[in-house]
Image: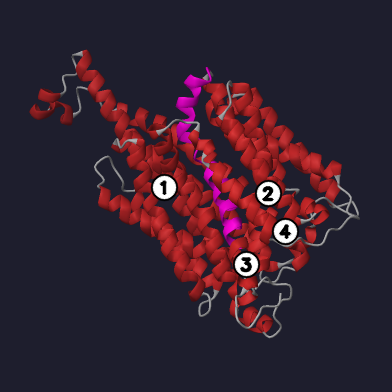
Amino acid sequence: MPTSAAAPIAVPGLRRTMVTICAMTATIMQALDTTIANVALPYMQGTLSASQDQINWVLTSYIVAAAIMTAPVGWIANRFGRKRIFIVCAGGFTVASVLCGAAQDINQMVLFRLLQGVFGAALVPLSQAVMLDSYALHERAKAMAIWGMGVMMGPIMGPSLGAWLTETYSWHWVFFVNLPFGIFTVLGLLVFMDETRKDRDLRFDWFGFTALAIGIGSLQLALDRGEQLGWTESSEIIAEFILSAVGFYYFFAHSLTTAKPFIQFALFRDRNFIGGCVFMAVMGLVLFSTMALASPFLQNVIGYPIITAGLLLASRGCGTFVAMMMVGRLMRYIEARTLIIAGLSITCLSLFYMTNWTDQTGVNEIVVLSVIQGFGFGLVFVPLSTVAFLTLPNHLRTDGTAMLTLMRNVASSIGISIVIAQLTEGSRRVHAVLSQHVNPFNHAMQMPDVRAMIDMGTDKGRAMMDAIVNMQAQIIAFSQDYQMVMIFTLCAIPLAIMIGSTKATLRRQSVAPEPAVIE
């Protein structure tokens, strides 16, 4: 756009800044809503007169809808245009959020959460694709650092923000808080974002989408409801796993034999993208599983209230913020795979020290380890988000962001299900082992100080001893879970060899900068 000599204002630069801000607000809205509603469930249950199983569908409906609708984001954006779909999804997500806050019964809430998941599924992959297209190749690391703050810090800050809104105002504001950000995002995208080319010749693969939707939806349902229904002891969970396997089988059998499959498998010819998918799954599993463990540990074992626990967990976001501010510059001098290895190693170190957490662990240790762990996450996420699209063709970028988001979401559900199941079973198993040693023949039970405090001949004494055994069983079970996540992360480090040299690629591609970049 021409500018006058008297007013040399960089209009394109302002346009890119506004598009970046709008993409970030969309990302933060969606990332927050994955966790912000969790702490409000007990308050919703009373207001909506719902049972425990019914209120859990508030979370399940959102997770399943978002998982199913993430896969077709690439096709929809290519067919109808990225700007149009982004605006529709941001607007639909905002309206669905307001409807959730205004819901009068559990049926309305589940329906509106379903709509929120449908519209919210596209926000993260589309915002990432917009950020990648808006910055030149040598600025991609900075762009991914900015975008990654929303993706990483949204789930971390969600529980504490949700607790504060619920206790200060009401659970309705957990959803109403999206309204001003949604309006700003829609208006900003309308004014500043450019439309992409539309491919009107694309035809939708309904069979492939249906098979994939059945596979992903059934898997998410099984993972989300498995803990409360007893896993393989429940016929519902077994049926969902079987249905998921059948859905995935027909999806791959159809996609590998049809001329135009629903998912563009050309994505997986790129070595860096495959490495990005693998490590994005690792990150989703480790990040969300540690979050799923840390919150109940701080509340149930140490005894912090929800807001205090949320503030302590927010310190992890501080470490992530610092790492993301640094890593954009570090990638100019250090290979992405080196940063990923360093970040995973730091994460392993923090998990190792977390295996020693007890009910006597102090605030300083919790904060320091959380900051260190967040720093490790930040070192991994930005290079990973950059390298995954370093050599991927431009026309596959939107499909790639959708696939990367899908991998992270599915892996996070798997990770949460595994650690919670292991925590429940491990606590029960350790309790049984410890209880065997609580008997009159144990020398510790015969010590005068112990006998003066705990008289096993009375109901009060037996109840006190059972509470002590329960507490110790939980501490050991949490330690075993942290150890399991640490070993998994440690085993993922050698997979960094899948990632090619980023410095050589950047030098080679910087000679011919990419066109169509919003300056």
Residue 25 included in the magenta stretch of the image: yes
Which residue does the image show at 65% across and 47% down from the upper left?
90
| The image quarter in which residue 216 lies | top right
Q: Amino acid at mark 2?
A: Ala
Q: Name the residue beneath numbered marker 2.
A: 122
Which residues fall within the magenta stretch? Answer: 20-49
| The image quarter in which residue 17 lies | bottom right
Regarding mark 4 in the picture, which secondary structure is present there?
helix
Question: Residue 469 versus residue 379: which sits nearer the camera?
Answer: 379
Q: Name the residue beneath numbered marker 3.
A: 16
Residue found at the far bottom of this picture: 511
Category of crowding for the residue at label 2, using alpha-carbon neighbours closer than 10 angstroms: few (below 14), some (14–19), many (at least 20): many
Residue 393 included in the magenta stretch of the image: no
Q: Is residue 480 above or below residue 61?
A: below
Foreground mark, 2 or 1, reads 2
* Residue 77 as seen in the image, left or right of residue 42: right
Task: Report how far apart the C-alphas of labels 3 and 2 lie in the structure.
Answer: 20 Å
Residue 482: assigned label: 1
- Mark 3 or 2, nearer chain start: 3
- Mark 3 or 4, nearer chain start: 3
